[in-house]
Image: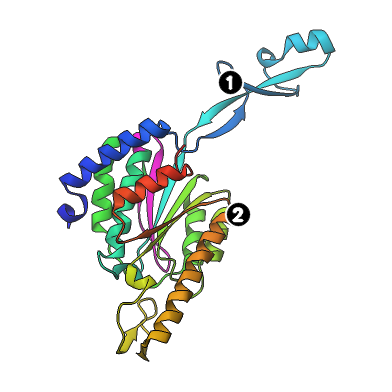
Amino acid sequence: MAQQLFGHDFMKKLEYLATVARRLYRLKVRPRRRKRIGTGLEFADRRDYESGDDFRYIDWNYFARMERLLVRLFEEEQEMSVYFLLDSSRSMAGGSGPKFDHARRALAALAYLGLANLDRVSVWSFSDDLGPFLSPKKGKAQIFALTEFLEKLRAGSATDFAASCASFVSKALRPGLAVILSDFFDTGGYERGLQTLFHNKFDLFLIHVYDNRDAAPDFLSDVRMIDSETGEPRNLTVNSRLRDAYEKEFAVFQKEIEAFATRHGAGWLAAPTSLAFEEMVLRVLRQGEFVG
């Protein structure tokens, strides 16, 4: 599996993607800034002097003109935290590829860009709750620890976005960019979980991973179907009318994910398994939302 997922060719493609990212965006992954009092930093603003403030930061020129004590405020760049939340539920094990392998390759490629930019990158698997996670890493050399972690993950159990996101928020040390890779199949809905992230000041980037057969089944017959999330069986006669209705419903489902992202100012990308992971990453870069 290691060779299949993250072999030599994969690593060569990562270097190519990092070169493209440096050329187009200088690998600046949506910097976060915070104001603080200090020197040698970029001037940002002033505020009224308060008892206990350091006299060194009083704006004496302003005081000479206006006879009012103000303290100079400065800005510094804050280290970026990038959290990858990987759907490891049973439904991700399906599809040609399968979807889980496709998501892991895409995650490793995007994480490599963050590591190369010296961001704090961590990976959290989830299904009905949080699963194994990789603690924050920094620097390109950490890609090997990250790929080793991803290789050991297995897809299983049902999906519960609400429980998983609530658990994640309680454990994450600070807000940052949360990149969710999922097919978004959850009988309870994905919205409440993602809203938990949004309301706790996380920026979101949604990557909808799906198989072409998820979007457009390629068979017409009597079938016994098993719900990959719940295990519930159902006998169906799939005719052209039913298949057309299903395809329309899936298109609506996908549009709803995109609309959710738009409402919350989040990035969004459709990532079918037929799309090579490097092309998927290039599309993320071209959006200018994940980096830039």
Magenta stretch containing residue 126, yes or no?
yes
The image shows residue 80, relative to residue 40, as above or below, that is below
Q: Which residue is drawn at 29% across and 47% down?
A: 146
Residue 247 coordinates in the image, percent (x, y): 43, 75
The image shows residue 252, relative to residue 41, as above or below, that is below
Magenta region, residue range = 115-135
Label 1: element kind: strand
- Label 1, label 2: how many angstroms apart (C-alpha)? 29 Å
Specify which label sits upstream in the sequence, 1 or 2. 1
* Three-letter amino acid code at the position of disc 2: His
Residue 134 coordinates in the image, percent (x, y): 34, 50
Residue at the extreme front: 240
The image shows residue 127, relative to residue 200, as above or below, that is below
* Three-letter amino acid code at the position of disc 1: Glu
**Is 262 placed left or right of 240 in the picture?**
right
Say whether residue 135 is visible.
no
Residue 240 coordinates in the image, percent (x, y): 38, 85
Residue 106 coordinates in the image, percent (x, y): 32, 52
Q: Residue at x 36, y 31 (%)?
A: 23
Main secondary structure found in the magenta portion = strand
Say whether residue 28 is visible.
yes
Q: Which of 248 and 23 is in front in this view?
A: 248
Q: Which residue is drawn at 80% across and 7% down?
A: 64
- Quarter holding the N terminus is bottom left
Magenta stretch containing residue 167, yes or no?
no
- Crowd tier of the residue under label 1, counting other residues whose Cα lies within 10 Å: few below 14, some 14–19, many 20 or above: few
Which image quarter: residue 70? top right
Residue marked by disc 1? 42
- Crowd tier of the residue under label 2, counting other residues whose Cα lies within 10 Å: few below 14, some 14–19, many 20 or above: few
**Is 7 placed left or right of 157 in the picture?**
left
**Is 209 placed left or right of 200 in the picture?**
left
Residue marked by disc 2? 199
